[in-house]
Image (spheres, grey):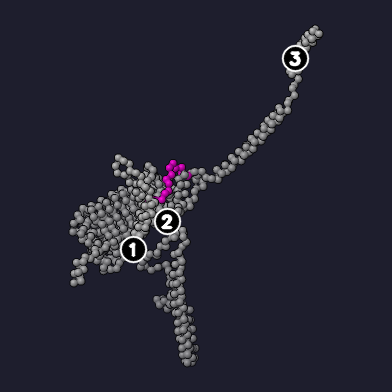
Amino acid sequence: MASSRRGSGSSGGRDAPSVMGGHREGNTNTPKSPSPQSKKSFASFVKKVKMGKKIEKALKDKGHSSASQEHEDDSKTPEPGDDSEPHVCTGNLSVDFTELCRRNNMAVIPPVVQRPHRPVTPPPEPASKAEKGKGKQQQQQPEPDPEPEGEGEPVEPPPKTYTTKDKYEYFKPTVQVEMDNPDKWDTVTEVFVKGWKIDETMMNVFKQCWLTMDRLHTINLWDTGLTCDTVEILSGFLPQCANLKTVILDGNPVPEENWYSLIGDESQIQTLSLRYNQITDKGAEQIGKALGTTQKANTKLLSLNLNGNRITDVGATAIAGGLRMNRNLLSLSLEHNQIGDLGAKKFGEVLSRFPLTHEEVVERRKLLSEKGAPDRTKSPPPSRRADSKDRPGSVRSSSQIDKKRDKSSKKKDTKGKDEKDDKKGKKEDKTAGKKADTKGSKASVVAETAGKTAAKGKDKKGGKDKKGAVQQEAEPETPELANPLLEQVENINHELWVPGNRVLISLNLKKNLIGSEGMKELLKAIQYQTTFSKLSSGSGTGLMRICLNKNKVSMDNDILEKINQMMLTKDPFYKPPPSSPENESQVAG
């Protein structure tokens, strides 16, 4: 039993390794069948790979379509600075200015802001309301903070009459505007640019913006570093701005001094200010020629300000020469220049009367010949030519003789009619004519009154425009200005003298170098204008205001006192002193 157990155990022990070895050899030689879990994982992996390929394909297609759309959009929308499709201005200064600056690749684009104003102080409340609201204010007012001990007097809160801004924000370039309606940027009326340079590119941007702004009437470019080129660009497009009448260019010294181009033949400017531009006699001579010559004169400019420049007697003489033929300028200011007695004498001569030069005499003769000569091109009508008595009898046409014979035969035939019938016919004709005349007169009166009422109604309807619509100011029909060369002349010492300029009403010569001799000439001019206005009712009233303070003459000078006394009553802003009670009692007594 023992042996069998051992044998079996030994045989089992010997056979076991062979069996196990057979299994190991079978694993190496024959493939193992995959389990169901591995099949599932493999199938999911294949699905993921297929889905990934589909997604990649879809993304590629989408990328191509989006790229093509972007390319089309880029082709449609113009790039900054693209000149193929320029920006069309709409009159909105804020939008147009920003867009044009962006297209010109400007590093800094000045913002368009409303011009700041001083806060308005609120009106005081009535006493009754203030007393009633005292209790409420005391209840609504918060309790003040406790005063810190040891720091002295308490600090008062800042007043509400100003606003604080960030550091250096005040000095940053901006375009300040005034608007009729603060909520609408297309209602800009005034533009202010101060303290930063305007080059040619920026001036062209302003050109495109201002041409579409219908309500713009004032531009103020102070200390903007203008040059000869920018002044030429400005003078070139200003006549196209219909409502732009006021131009202020103070603090812009230009070496070329081409300011005369602003008041050329096509200029529409009525008020021009060129203060502190370092204008010399060179620029003053050109301005004088632009004001008026024997052939032409400026008919738009009303006010010219040349304060704070370097104009001497030479430039003043040129400006006075422009006033010889100019009959439109109302105000001239030459304060703080270098004008002496010679310049004052020329102004006095122009304001009183002056002799014509040879060139002016020749031009006067041309005007008189054109005015008095008949039209030679026109021929008289044939009826006048036929009936003219200057023609000899042999030249008269036979048709006229035949007409006369026919008339004589008709008269003989009508003599045989009854005189009574003629008298009756005449009476009937007279009565019918009277009735027709009365009817016609009544009808004409009715038509005239109807026309007047219709015209008034049209004027009233035309004056009421819709809100927000641009109301273009209808310029009144002004008569043509009379040429000074055609005025009545006086022959003095074989020279033709004409009356001076009586249209200029304001002259400012303060802070110059005028002495007593120049004051005498100005006094003579004022006296002449006073007597001339009394004797004849000509065009213009003469000077109504003149400033001569702070010259070489002291304020106590007799001549200056006479001038001030004569001009005191002419000044439109003069108010007579109130009568004292002593004078009233004397008058009553």
Q: Residue 250 in the image: x percent, y percent?
A: 34, 50
Q: Secondary structure at mark 2?
A: loop
What's the distance in space between the residues labelled 1 and 2, CA to CA? 40 Å
SS for callout 1: loop
**In which quadrant will I find the N terminus?**
top right
Write the residue at 33% across / 59% down. Answer: 329
Q: Quadrant of residue 48?
A: top right
Q: Answer yes or no: do the residues labelled 2 and 3 have beta carbons within 8 Å? A: no
**Is residue 105 within the magenta segment?**
yes
- Judging depth in this view, the residue of 516 and 146 nearest the camera is 146
Between the residue at mark 3 and the residue at mark 1, the CA separation in whole angstroms equals 139 Å
User: Which amino acid, by three-letter code, is at mark 2?
Assistant: Asp
Query: Quarter of the image holding residue 327?
Result: bottom left
Is 189 located above or below residue 70 in the figure? below
Q: Earlier in the sequence, mark 3 or mark 1?
A: 3
Between the C-alphas of marks 2 and 3, the distance is: 108 Å
State the image coordinates of residue 586 (x, y, percent, origin top left). 18, 69
The answer to whether 314 appears left or right of 442 in the picture is left
Q: Tag 3: residue type? A: Gly
- Residue 329 disc label: none
Q: Which residues are magenta?
A: 103-117
Numbered circle sitting on residue 180: 2
* Residue 519 spot, x, y in % from top left: 21, 57
Give the foreground label among 1 and 2.
Answer: 2
Q: Which mark is residue 483?
A: 1
Question: Label 3, on which residue?
Answer: 21
Which residue appears farthest toward the front when viewing the image? Answer: 1
**Residue 342 image position (x, y, % from top left):** 23, 54
